[in-house]
Amino acid sequence: MTQFLHGVEVIEIDDGSRPIQTVKSAVIGLVGTAPGAASAIAATLTLGSAILNDGLVFIAKQAGTEGNAISVEIIYLPSASVELAVDVDGNKIEILLATDAQSEVTSTSTDIKAAVEAKPEAAALVSTAVLGDGSGDVAPAPRTYLAGGENEPFPLNKPVAVAGSRKRAKGLGTGGTLPAAIDDIFDQTGALVIVVRTEKGADDATTQANIIKAMQGWLDSQTETGYTPRILIAPEFSQVDAVASEMEAKAARLRAITYADCKRTASYTDAIKRARQFGMRVEMQWPWVRVFDTEQAKEIDRPSSARAAGLRARIDAEKGFWWSKSNNQIYGIVGTSQPVDWALGDPNTTANMLNENKVSTIIREGGFRHWGNRTCSVDPKWTFEQTRRTADIINDSVQRSHMWAVDRNITKTYVDDVVGGVNAYLRELKALGAILGGECWADPELNSPATIQKGLVYFDFDFCPPYPAEHIVFRSRINNDYLEEVFG
């Protein structure tokens, strides 16, 4: 103790293991166009009325919520021969009414409009309009704020979180690729979608370049929205090789999976060839799906990636990120753009050949079902999508939950706390069925005195994910010994 105390002191000990929180897995990153998206709304304030011809409307020059911070006060001094004056203090506009020799107000709404426009500081904040003919004398008014200003709901190239609500997505309008993709997703589940809107270019090449640039919004999402996208899609664009390749690159940085479409007219052999271009973070989808479009009152073809993403989010929510989405029903479709033949025990069907060559498809059996587990990986370790996602979620959860451990003194207690916390998390995952087992330890050979002296400490952990029963074999035999039971 460094000081004398005749009494009782409490010292807080801040060691001990910390619980690890699993990161949110069912977050979809969606990029596309929406030319009809809603614009920002400017804040306004109305004083007076058109009937008395003394009405004034103040409109914020800058659309958005910032305009709601602007206030207007109209002041009357009961003195003779006061001159009309406008004063600005920050976002506060003060208007001093003019009076005549008898202290009567002489400022009309037209006069005030002209005075505000003549004051550069006020004109920078608001524009002004009169109601009626503007000839009426204006009455004093207490300080009142402009209201109704709203920001652009989907600003260009900025990530916006849409939490499972079609109402929240109405700001996208009806044109472009985003509104239809949102409907595809929400037909499956009320997912959390990180939407990044970009401009439609003068031609397809420019639009595709804009789509690729907008993917930066996925990387910015954690800072801007608090969520990291884990399922990346760009419906109506991901059939383009350049777009799909950039999606794969972003998926690697985000520990995410991306679902890539093929061209609508691609054959199943085209899909098989295309799958060879990508790796373990891409799941190839073929064919497109047929849906009924209520606006056009007819069936249309849609890329399947958005519905696959919605299905993935639904399975995450209902069962867990460690479950396969294959053999689960896809909602809201009436068919596929091209036929997909399938039989449960026949290896020579289109569906089976696609799956064998790392392409997921859709079969019709008790509804339309997603059929396929495999990524485009050539490494057998990462064959299954659910294996890749399980590793991603666990790795990210462990990493993000150890901010507290950075820059602490490396002591035996410190090492035990970290190891204990990770092992507790792995036990929790095992109890949930997310893994079959796992363990964390600190390797003494890696954590040598020379290593620790550099401020570097190593912790190893392993785990075993569950694997999908993709191929079930029943071995059948005829056993005539049971004939003895006929006369037994």
Image: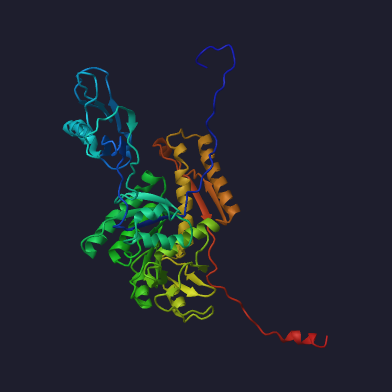
Answer yes or no: is residue 358 visible.
no
Rendered view: 66 above or below 294: above
> Image quadrant for the C terminus?
bottom right
Q: Please state if 159 lies on the left or on the right of 15 as rendered.
A: left
Q: Nearer the viewer, residue 117 or 371?
A: 117
Res 300 quadrant in image: bottom left
Residue at the image position 30 percent from the left and 34 percent from the top: 48
Residue 139 in picture, x, y percent from top left: 29, 28
Along the line of sight, which residue is nearer the eye, 447 or 329?
329
The residue lying at 22 percent from left, 28 percent from top is 107
Q: Position of residue 451 (x, y in %)?
A: 41, 40
Residue 179, quarter of the rendered image:
bottom left
Q: Which one is nearer the viewer's eye here, 336 or 435?
A: 336
Residue extending furthest right? Answer: 488
Q: Residue furthest left?
A: 118
Is residue 3 in sight in this rendering?
yes
Where on the picture, by quarter, is residue 7? top right
Q: Position of residue 225 (x, y in %)?
A: 39, 46
Q: Position of residue 45 (x, y in %)?
A: 31, 37
